[in-house]
Amino acid sequence: MKLDDRNSLKLLGTDRINNLDNANDRNSLKLLGNISSVESMGLADGPGIRYVVFLQGCQLRCQYCHNPETWNLDGGRETITPHDLIRRIERYKSYFGKSGGVTFSGGEPLLQPKFLLECLSLCREKGINTVLDTAGVGISPRDEIEKILSLCDLVILDIKAVREEDYKNLTGQPMSRFKNFLSICQEKGVKLWLRQVIVPGLNDNEENIKELAHFIKPLKNVERVELLPYKNLGEIKYKTLGIKYRLEGLENMDEEKCRCLETLLKELIEKI
Ligand code: SF4
């Protein structure tokens, strides 16, 4: 037995191990996902009613992030096998209707690629619609990303910024992994919803909207484009965690202005 397996057994506990009911369960002992939280009836993370799984871990450090507790890959509230998670999700299947399903979000779900892949594969087996809500910045090799995408019904992709220097300033990371992920999505014909968070004084201006429109226009399979207003939700969490919040004291983004910028963005994409 490899060290990873022994650790997995330790995490699961002997009672759980003795109750394993089939070979698939025994195999899934090798694979544990680290979950930050779940939302059983989500309405904002994809079509219809969705079970949203927030996976632990993120390598970006977005200035406006309101979930800094998800950053550490070793943190999280719960460790679970793919089979146990999907069994839990199946209890909500009757609420999903024709359009709902499960959304894997984060943190950054691509940071736990093997767990994600197994969950997506089980969802496909059980006819559960899947959405991947991501910034496209994991650590997976290309073939792993391709496998993941082949099992996603939709990708909600967060476009942090379209200029390299703005992206780095906002997230602390270069743009290369995001660009690579987006190009694989394009090659594979993945359906996309594109999002950007609009932050007062940072990107709530027409110049950004024009650049975003030019970035989005050539992309294929884009079903929806959304601008989300920044909300100052995380300040207390940063204080509790002892991390400096770079947007301290910043007001929420005006929702009406954000809606106007979204309308402008859609008009520009049509016109260009
Ligand atoms: S990608 Fe999401 S979880 Fe990661 S730092 Fe940015 S906002 Fe936070």
Image (cartoon, helix red, strand yellow):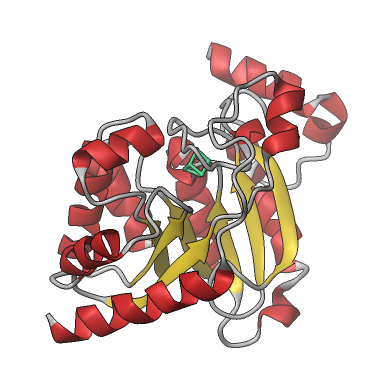
Instruction: Specify the quadrant that holds the N terminus.
Output: top right
- Camera-nearest residue between 237 and 16: 237
Q: Residue at x 58, y 37 (%)?
A: 27
Q: Residue at x 62, y 43 (%)?
A: 66
Quadrant housing residue 226 = bottom left
Q: Position of residue 34 (x, y in %)?
A: 63, 35
Query: How many numbered markers are drawn?
Result: 0
- Camera-nearest residue between 214 and 143: 214
Q: Vertically, is 124 above or below 82?
A: below
**Drawn side of residue 43 relative to residue 127, left or right:** right
Q: Position of residue 13 (x, y in %)?
A: 81, 25
Q: Vertically, is 180 above or below 188?
A: above
Q: Is residue 111 visible?
A: yes
Q: Position of residue 104 (x, y in %)?
A: 55, 55
**Drawn side of residue 106 relative to residue 211, left or right:** right
**Drawn side of residue 207 relative to residue 28, left or right:** left
**Drawn side of residue 184 relative to residue 199, left or right:** left
Instruction: Specify the quadrant that holds the C terminus.
Output: bottom left
Quadrant housing residue 234 = top right
Q: Is residue 124 visible?
A: no
Quadrant housing residue 51 = bottom right
Q: Position of residue 264 (x, y in %)?
A: 32, 79
Q: Residue at x 48, y 70 (%)?
A: 258
